[in-house]
Amino acid sequence: MKKASKFEKVAARCWNLLNEGKPFTPIFTTGVFLMFTIGEWNETSFWFSFLLSLGGTLPLFALCFVYDFPLFLRNYLFIPLIASLLLLNAPPLSLWMLAAGLYFFFTVFFWGTLYYHLRIGTTWLNFTRFWKLVLKNSDSTSGNAQEQLPKVFMLLTVWHYLFQQVGAFGFTFSDYTPVLYVTIGFAIFAWILHRYLFDWKPSEYEEFTAKEEIQAKSDKVVVIVVDGMRKDRFEKAKTPYLDKLREEGTEYRQMETVYPARTVVCFSSMFTGTYPREHGITSNMVWRLGIKVESIFDSLRKVGKKGKLLGIAHLVDAMGNDVETVTAVMNNDVADPSIMKRAKGIMENENPDLLIVQMIATDQTGHSRGVFYDEYLQKINEADQLIEDFVDYLNEEGHMKNTTLIICADHGQADGIGGHGHLDEGERFVPFIMHGPHIRKGIAVNEKHSLVSLAPTIAHLLGAPFPKNSRGPVLKQAIKESRD
């Protein structure tokens, strides 16, 4: 299986500038404004007016970057948009039409059709379904039309007003006053909404994981993360092998992901035991490479053990050399089989004490085709079969004699192009199953737990110290405390 090339790693980071809503808004708005004024570029005064009006709009750009409006919060964006129209001269309708046209071209055709066809092999007709995902998406990615378009329209209205005033050479502070009203009003409005309505962020463990005597119970731990596997859709899929593991092991029925529920954020929290405010990874757009705290891989090295994470390119941004990358540029039907084949190779050649495998096809299908369609369930069905085949291989090679197997998802997925991040319905709780000789049989834990417990639980099983900033409690409801 091909590893992710240096070009793919850089390309993944660049793509996140357009995928994440925060950087997309200023990039896209600037591009639209430049295209709208392309006929004036050769005029002497254009760039002076462009830069000066841009400077006057920057505070509003900054507010749109700081405050995102996911879920129902986006429904309130029409209020500052109408206020900007009432206080300022309305821009030409053609400016808004250009912005809307370019936006839907980018999301529906470039992203939803061309990009996904070239990257994972979706049909050239994917746009016939993808436009629905763009309109329904409630997560703060660039694909949230109901958030992005009001923001872009408001920014273009303010920017065009200032551009016209500067171009008339009659610009005074009084001309800037209505822009101040819009900007200050938006700041107060956004702060109130986020202060009083932004109430769905999961609660965090305040204390560090309680220290304990180090004593290994398992010789190995294998963690298989089915990226983006939504819990209620998992319940509807045909998963006879995972159902068997649930019956013979311990299932955590209210395992909660972290906020924001982005893949790199979730993996960082899962394998450090703490939250984004401490490990420093706050979105898939990683501005500073590397986590700021110890990971489970660091803990294992302290006791002479080895861990390996097999996943796609952007996990390198957080976990560095502890990740063996796989290319994400392949037909989605062969992605997970190729990943599991490489996982077998790692066990055969390196035999790590901890192996973490990221299966990506379910998540990619949810993003490109939606979660409420048969294709999504089919990918969960296939994941079940591949996991069974992999565990059979481990048994045949003698790797499962005293091994704990953990099957989970990093986050769920909503119905939309972004799909996850801000904990819409279907994102918050994830499947979580533990199985092995030292895992209790037939147990269902209904108490709420968090994925930050994964790292300390792995450390507990393998006899390693907890990562330094670990806050999640060990999942002891599942573990037999004596080693047979």
Image (spheres, rainbow, N blue to C red):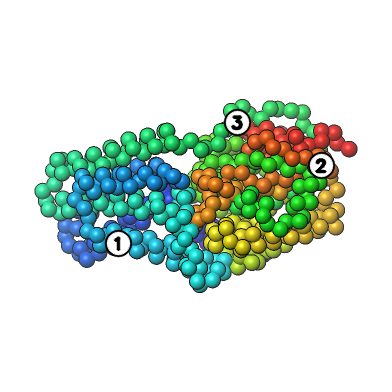
Note whether 475 is above or below 82 in the view shown. above
Q: According to the image, label 1 marks what residue? A: 97
The quarter of the rendered structure image containing the C terminus is top right
What amino acid does circle 2 point to?
Lys
Q: Nearer the viewer, residue 307 or 479?
A: 479
As helix, strand or loop, the secondary structure at mark 3 comes to loop
Left or right: 345, with 208 as reference point: right
Instruction: Check disc 2: other Cα within 10 Å, few if <14, some if 14-19, many if 20+.
Output: many
Q: Position of residue 249 (x, y in %)?
A: 79, 44
The answer to whether residue 476 is seen in the rendering is: yes
Q: Position of residue 149 (x, y in %)?
A: 36, 54
What amino acid does circle 3 point to?
Tyr
- Labels 2, 3: front one: 2
Q: Nearer the viewer, residue 466 or 189?
A: 189
Left or right: 449, with 74 as reference point: right
Q: Residue at x 39, y 42 (%)?
A: 66
Q: Residue at x 69, y 60 (%)?
A: 381
Nearer the N terminus, badge 2 or badge 1?
1
Q: According to the image, label 2 marks what residue? A: 441
Q: According to the image, label 3 marks what residue? A: 205
Instruction: Check disc 3: other Cα within 10 Å, few if <14, some if 14-19, many if 20+.
Output: some
The answer to whether residue 226 is seen in the rendering is: no
Q: Residue at x 42, y 43 (%)?
A: 73
What amino acid does circle 1 point to?
Met
Q: Position of residue 310 (x, y in %)?
A: 66, 54
As helix, strand or loop, the secondary structure at mark 1 comes to helix
Instruction: Check disc 1: other Cα within 10 Å, few if <14, some if 14-19, many if 20+.
Output: few
- Residue extending farthest to the right is 484
